[in-house]
Image: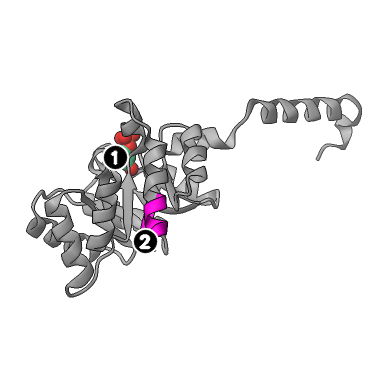
Amino acid sequence: MKFFLDSANFKEIEEAHSWGVVSGVTTNPSLVSKEKGPFDEIVKKICNLMPDCPVSVEVLSTVSGGMVEEAHRLAALADNVVIKIPMGAEGLKAVHRLSTEGKKVPCNVTLVFSANQALLASRAGAAYVSPFIGRIDDIGWDGTDLVKNIMNIFTCHELDTKVIAASIRHPLHVEQVAAAGAHIATVPFSVLGQMSRHPLTDLGIERFLADWGKTRQEERI
Ligand code: G3P
């Protein structure tokens, strides 16, 4: 399973990229609204920070014609832009047009909450689908089960749309969607940090340094 960073924050993106574990970035209007500066400049800078990695940027229009127009405009900002399109009939129409007409634009269908939505998005031509795990758990259903279902269906029908487990809230979600076979998990920076830490690792380092200091303090470089 690959990791994408779910963020529009330059510092977080630069730091996560330096760890060598992140293969893409996903943004959404809520994440971009937390950052300063014109939208297009933010998109260009993120794409520049992560060259050769897909950067998902979401359209704001709610009708297919507007989504297609916005998608072409945003896709012209950088070569690695992927267009996030909200699920629904208008979204499907937009994805179909963007994947078949003129200059093709890769789409990530977002706000997916059922396997049927994922199946439709894939058939319409989506390069990625994003089931929202945390928001499903929030309403008392099981987000990980949804990822399992989608993976089974996509495997069974040999669909090549990549599944991005999104709305990841904690490290256990990451392990669960990895075990469910998700191609990608898009993870907030805070969760990436939590994944890297363990109290026994910290304690282990502390003990090693303390033991070393007892007899070999002077040998430290
Ligand atoms: O990638 C989608 C994600 O950003 C949504 O997360 O935590 O707002 O449900 P959340």
Residue sitting nearer the eye, 118 or 18: 118
Q: Name the residue carrying label 1.
A: 31
Is tag 1's residue or tag 2's residue first in the polypeptide sequence? 1
Residue farthest toward the right in the current orientation of the protein: 215
Residue farthest toward the front in the current orientation of the protein: 156
* Ligand 1 lies under 8 Å from the Cβ of mark 2: no
Circle on res. 134: none
Residue sitting nearer the eye, 183 or 193: 183
| Category of crowding for the residue at label 1, using alpha-carbon neighbours closer than 10 angstroms: few (below 14), some (14–19), many (at least 20) | few
Q: Secondary structure at mark 1?
A: helix
Q: Name the residue carrying label 2.
A: 157
Residue 83 seen: no
Query: Is disc 1 in contact with disc 2, using a CB cutoff of under 8 Å?
Result: no
Residue 113 seen: yes
Which of the four quarters of the rendered structure image does ligand 1 lie in? top left
Position of 83 with respect to 209 (left or right) is left
- List x then y, in percent, for residue 55: 34, 55
Residue type at mark 1: give it: Leu
- Of badges 1 and 2, nearer the viewer stands 2
Residue type at mark 2: give it: His
* Ligand 1 lies under 8 Å from the Cβ of mark 1: yes
Could you say which quadrant of the image residue 202 lies in? top right
117 up-or-down from 142: above or below: below
Residue interval drawn in magenta: 151-162
Name the residue rendered at 24%, 48% in the picture: 117
Q: Secondary structure at mark 2?
A: loop
Name the residue rendered at 25%, 55% in the picture: 121
